[in-house]
Amino acid sequence: MFSIKHAAVLFSASLFLPSCSSNPNSPQLASTTRAGESSAQGYYDNAKASQAAGKIGRAARDFRTVYVRYPLSPNAGDAAYRYAKILESQGELLESFDAYNAVVTKYPASPHYAEAIKRQETIAHQVAQGHITNSFIGIKSRIEIKRTTAMLASVRDNAPRAASADKAQFAIGQVHESRGSGATGTARAIAAYRQLTRDYPDSQYAPEAQYRIGAILLAEAKDGNQDSANLDRAKQAFDDLLLRYPNSKQAKLAKSQIGKLASGDIQRSFDVAEFYRKKGQTSSALFYYKEAASKSGPGPLRSQAQSWINKLSAQ
């Protein structure tokens, strides 16, 4: 018995099968074209009749046939859209996304273009948020990161000037940040957020993306050994946020993080001074005690640094 799932599999596979009749660039005789249009119309009419009669599987099969075998027929775009809608109504959302993508990329003049864009966006974000899962022998699992980010990238690229584009790009960063692993996941999250701030600098998501770059780098430094390079990069990210988005709510958070980083720098200078003092390297110890004293405000750390400056200078 034909099923929607089988239709989806056949649809995806058939896109890669060579066919003279489905290649828009292949020259076709007028008689062949007329015959093809007649066949396409027959399949299309049958599909609509089957759908009206509640024979959804048969309707899906015939709509798919119209689009795959007769991509140049007048009803091909509508058939692809109807096929996508059936798949979506049957819960085959990943396959439905691909069918909507065919409408968007191959039939931009279709009256269903805008709706296909919207449905793609909805499905992609549902996948990114974990609301759509794979099911294998009863065990559900999230859609893999590569597939998820590819869907979001399609949403972004299919309408690069729409509001959906920067939202999709931000979601790509979120997926890598929350579900990525190790240095690769971190690097890809940062790259995605940087692409957002570069390509969509006026986006409502840009300040948050810029802040997350700094926060990720800061977390990396804290999880490791206080790597100074990551700390410097984090501070630079926060500084860039203050420069580019001074009135954003994230700017306040960035100022706080910069203050903590500055305090950390002072503490590190004091710790280095202590290290050299205990090693008997007075000149090096004095250098770092002076650095700590000059950068810190009134308080215990500054008092301790100044005390050792006085003691070591008197030796």
Image (cartoon, grey):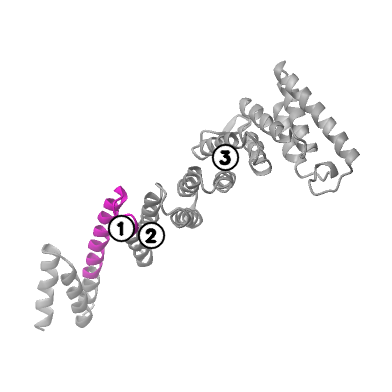
Q: Identity of the amino acid at label 1? A: Leu
Q: In the image shown, does 81 or 7 lie closer to the viewer? A: 81
| Figure check: 95 above or below 16 | above
Highlighted magenta segment, given as a residue range: 243-270
Q: Nearer the viewer, mark 1 or mark 3?
A: 1
Q: Which of marks 1 and 2 is in front?
A: 1
Q: Do the residues labelled 3 and 2 touch (CB within 8 Å)?
A: no
| Figure check: 150 above or below 78 | below
Q: Give the tally of numbered discs.
A: 3
Could you tell which of marks 1 and 2 lies nearer the N-terminus?
A: 2
Q: In the image shown, does 262 or 120 lie closer to the viewer? A: 120
- Residue at label 2? 224
- Residue at label 1? 242
Q: Does the magenta stretch include residue 2?
A: no
Task: Report x, y in % for residue 236.
Answer: 35, 63
**Which of the image's four quarters has the N terminus?**
top right
Q: Does the magenta stretch include residue 245?
A: yes
Query: Which residue appears at 39% of the width and 58% of the height?
Result: 217
At mark 3, the secondary structure is loop
Marks 3/2: CA distance? Answer: 30 Å
Task: Report x, y in % for residue 189.
Answer: 47, 53
Q: Is residue 108 visible?
A: yes
Query: Which residue appears at 60% of the width and 35% of the height?
Result: 116
- Locate residue 19 relative to residue 183 in the image: left or right: right
Q: Identity of the amino acid at label 3? A: Ile
Q: In the image shown, does 74 or 122 lie closer to the viewer? A: 74
- Residue at label 3? 143
